[in-house]
Amino acid sequence: MPVVKGPEKPKASQDGELAPAKEQVAASAQPVRRPRWLQATIIGLGAVAILQAGVIGVLILLRPKPQQTPPREITLGQFRFTAGPEDPGRLRGCEFRVSVLLDRQWQASAASRMQEEPSRFRQAVEELLREARSTDFADTSLRHLRLHIKEKLNEALGVAAVAEVLITDWRPEWGEPPSGSPACQPSQGEDFPPSPNVQL
């Protein structure tokens, strides 16, 4: 009796997988190639982005820092005058604070020097006070004393940079003079010294 054969099944490979399925897997595993023009475009855009970041970083580093305007008023600090035993005045001593107003023409350079070397300019004022006498304080506006301090500081600066000297926080010490010479004490009710009228 003849045997009827059915449709042949696809032969399995040695690893047990069907041959057509294995070919499909191998085809899907192959990498998809991009067009060359697309690859070049992506590389170019990346290079441009890196270049722009580098340029921005250099500009930030080279950007000039904002310059601060130097102060026009410089405070030299607190000073003290002590009258010698031969000084005939009633002002036996005083303490006060000295500040200066700088000329706008020399403001930047003078402020820089006075801030970098404060001891030098303090020493100039202290030398002047060691030579001073109570009579130098007789003027209630201290005009002569402020003028001498101004000249001394301008001499130390080498230019006429100090436009005005301000004396504040005045604390005098009165006493009887060693001799009967006229006193330097101001009249009653008078501010000694008054605040100078300076227009900034």
Image (cartoon, grey):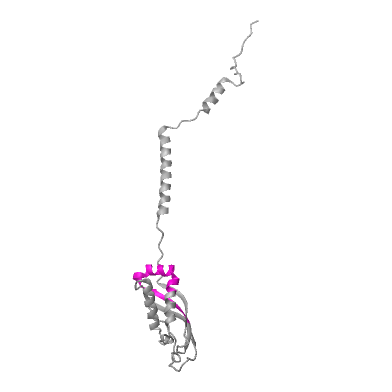
Is residue 70 at all visible to an observer of this figure? no
Is residue 163 at all visible to an observer of this figure? yes
Q: Which residue occupies the foreground of this view, 80 or 6? A: 80
Above or below — where is 88 with respect to 168?
A: below
Q: Which residue occupies the foreground of this view, 130 or 170? A: 130
Horizontal placement of 122 versus 12: left or right? left
Residue drawn at x 53%, y 28% as measured from the top left: 29
Residue drawn at x 38%, y 73% as measured from the top left: 156
Residue farthest toward the bottom in the current orientation of the protein: 180
Horizontal placement of 88 versus 18: left or right? left
The main secondary structure of the magenta stretch is helix
**Residue 163 at x, y percent in the picture:** 36, 75
Residue 121: image quadrant is: bottom left
**Residue 175 at x, y percent in the picture:** 50, 90
Residue drawn at x 55%, y 26% as measured from the top left: 25
The quarter in which the C terminus is drawn is: bottom left
Residue drawn at x 37%, y 67% as measured from the top left: 109
The quarter in which the N terminus is drawn is: top right
Highlighted range, magenta: 95-122
Q: Which residue occupies the foreground of this view, 16 or 112? A: 112
Above or below — where is 19 with respect to 57?
A: above
**Residue 89 at x, y percent in the picture:** 45, 89
Q: Is residue 97 magenta?
A: yes
Residue farthest toward the front in the current orientation of the protein: 86
Q: Which residue occupies the foreground of this view, 39 or 115? A: 115
**Residue 12 at x, y percent in the picture:** 60, 18
